[in-house]
Amino acid sequence: MKRILVLLSLFVFTAGCSLEPPAWSQSGGAGDDDNVVIGVSISTLNNPFFVTLKDGIEATAEEKGYEVKVVDAQDDSAKQVNDIADLMQQGIDYLVVNPTDSAAISSSVESANGSDIPVITLDRSVESGEVAAFIASDNVAGGEMGAAFIVDQLGEGSKVAELEGVPGASATRERGKGFTNVAKESLDVVTSQTANFNRSEGLNVTQNILQANPDIEAIFSHNDEMALGAVEAAPDDVLVVGFDGSEDALNSIENGALDATVAQQPDLMGETAINAVEKLENGEDVEDEIKVELMLETQE
């Protein structure tokens, strides 16, 4: 009889253990109330802008005693989805995402929602899923700022080419919209072609554009990396305007190569993301959309 009771006790204990969900699947991610763990997925760390963004996140998180786990999507939407799934299985309390593609990342945001993990997006929005805060520059206003600078420097009706970012990224749509708001009335946009936010593609696409349109007077680029590629391909009398305010772009402006950049503050964006995490952790309200100030950096 005793043997039967012991066996029954073991069975109940084992069955009870098997019903307990793993720590990462429980509300709150890591399950350690004393240690806030933040998963961070960056679209690419091959771009200095996003490296600075990451540095701002890590520096502020260290000040607050938060643990950060950073993954690099390498501009691959499928990899970013897998990376985020891995972060969730490792156990995170918050997810900070700089999307490669605003639509492709939606399923990951919805998955985090289902696990009660608050999501903060940086620089680019998502098309679906619940986001606690979206932190970015006003990309539409920035596109308008870049176009207005070209008009101021060259006059109305100047022939311009537009280098577009990654198709599907909200930053591409918004910067392009802002540029068009001004350009449709004041500039002659000869062509708009994508170079995927990439410097080498910016160089190659610019070479092709100038070969087909040698009378181009200016180039507006959706980011600094493509603009720096364009500078290498364009003659000195072609005005080139970038967007981001990366260190390489600012150095290029100082050296008289790049003409201007619509400068974001990626370190401040990263800092703002961690400050939003702190507010959420303390049960405070966070604005749905937080805009970080832009500045136009020029050679003057």
Image (tube, grey):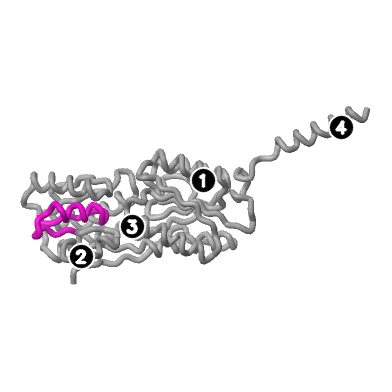
Q: Nearer the N terminus, badge 4 or badge 3?
A: 4
| Number of other residues with Cα within 10 Å of mark 1, as a class: few under 14, some 14 to 19, many 20 or more | many
Q: Amino acid at mark 3?
A: Phe
Q: Mark 1 sits on what residue?
A: 87
Residue at the image position 55 percent from the left and 42 percent from the top: 89
Residue tagged 3: 49
Q: Amino acid at mark 2?
A: Ile
**Camera-nearest residue between 12 and 243:** 12
Write the start and end of the magenta stretch as one range: 217-240
In contact (CB < 8 Å): disc 1 and disc 4: no
Instruction: Say if mark 4 contacts mark 2, CB within 8 Å.
Output: no
* Number of the front mark, 1 or 4: 4
Say what amino acid the circle numbered 1 marks.
Leu
Q: Amino acid at mark 4?
A: Val
Which residue is identified by label 4? 6
Task: Say which element carries label 2.
Answer: helix
Which of the two labelled residues, at mark 3 and mark 1, occupies the earlier sequence position? Answer: 3
- Quadrant containing the N terminus is top right
x 40%, y 45%: residue = 73
Q: First in sequence, mark 1 or 4: give its number.
A: 4
Q: Position of residue 226 (x, y in %)?
A: 23, 52
Image quadrant in which you'd find residue 280? bottom right
Q: How far apart, in angstroms, are the residues tagged by discs 4 and 3?
A: 63 Å
